[in-house]
Amino acid sequence: MTFWTIVFSAFGFLSPAKRGALLMAELSFFVLMGAVAGYVAARMYKTFKGKAWQYATLCTALGFPGLCFLMFFILDLMAWGYESTDAVPFTTIVVLLMMWFGISTPLVFLGAYYGYKQDAIEFPVKTSSIPRQIPDQPWFMGAPFTLMIGGILPFGACFVELYFIMASVWMNYYYYVFGFLLLVFLILIITCAEITLLFNYFQLCNEDYHWWWRSFGTSGSTAIYVFLYSFVYFQNLEANSLPTYVLYFGYMGLASIGLFLMTGFIGVASSFWFNKVIFESVKFD
């Protein structure tokens, strides 16, 4: 969704002067990507030998969208209560619900249906059903350190552009350099993959085979730095009431959760590919 929105904006199909059109494009891409989300979730879940595929598909369709809608509805109720002009009309909320349950959710189940019909991704080596004891790990391979270091480089690659994006969202500035934003987004993806692969390699060298959640958290920790940066940027705003604080940190928290899931998936996917390649090489040798 993010990639295609930036690409269409960079090629001039979406004008930054028409923010409503840009927002509708993001929502449309998110809804249509439901089929891709269902397919990928089903394929990965089947690869890791999951049994409750109905529950996994339901979580894919309702998990993150449900959290977004719940937080959005609560913040919009507050805006209604204070008679803010930024409050979203009730008809718009009904349209969002129709897009969610009428288009996105069926597409998720359709993608999951075709994903489960595909063969599971085969691992190059056979694993034992008896878990091996993991030796003591050095201090720099602990979860706190990897989370702290793993998010610094990706955040450093995009924090300058993040300032202009937040200025566009919160200070009504126009943002036009979508071509440069596309470049920064690609750098963010590459940086997340590289730092995750580095820690994943160190982890395997230390005989710790629990790489999946560690990989997810290593690159996903970029979102923690983004949320912390929002506290610094908040000093540029003229906040004089409680709703301002709640709306700002509520929406920034929601954006950070979305970024955490996106960058976390980049880490898991890159580590999965890396492990598959190196173990295939070992088997071949």
Image (spheres, rainbow, N blue to C red):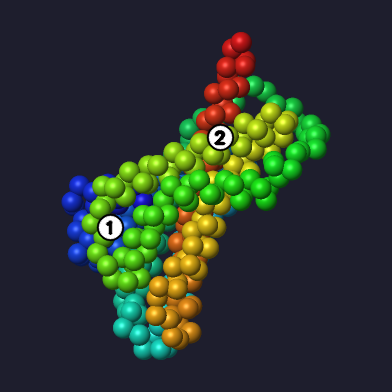
Q: Position of residue 177 (x, y in %)?
A: 25, 53
Q: Which residue is drawn at 32% across and 53% down?
A: 29
User: In front: 97, or 86?
Assistant: 86
Q: Residue at x 19, y 59 (%)?
A: 15
Q: Which mark is residue 129?
A: none
Query: Which residue is denoted by mark 2 in the rendering?
Result: 197
Q: Can residue 264 be seen in this view?
A: no
- Among the 4 quarters of the image, the one containing residue 146: top right
- Among the 4 quarters of the image, the one containing residue 86: bottom left
Q: Residue at x 56, y 26 (%)?
A: 276
Q: Is residue 153 visible?
A: yes
Q: What element carries label 2?
A: helix
Q: What element carries label 1?
A: helix
Q: In this view, does 219 lie above or below 128?
A: below
Query: Which residue is denoted by mark 1 in the rendering?
Result: 25
Q: Where is residue 89 in the image (x, y as percent from the top left)?
A: 32, 79
Q: Where is residue 2 in the image (x, y as percent from the top left)?
A: 36, 51
User: In front: 150, or 282?
Assistant: 150
Q: Distance between the residues labelled 1 and 2?
A: 33 Å
Q: Is residue 111 above or below residue 67?
A: above
Instruction: Determine the residue located farthest toward the top in the rendered image.
Output: 285
Q: Is residue 197 left or right of residue 95?
A: right
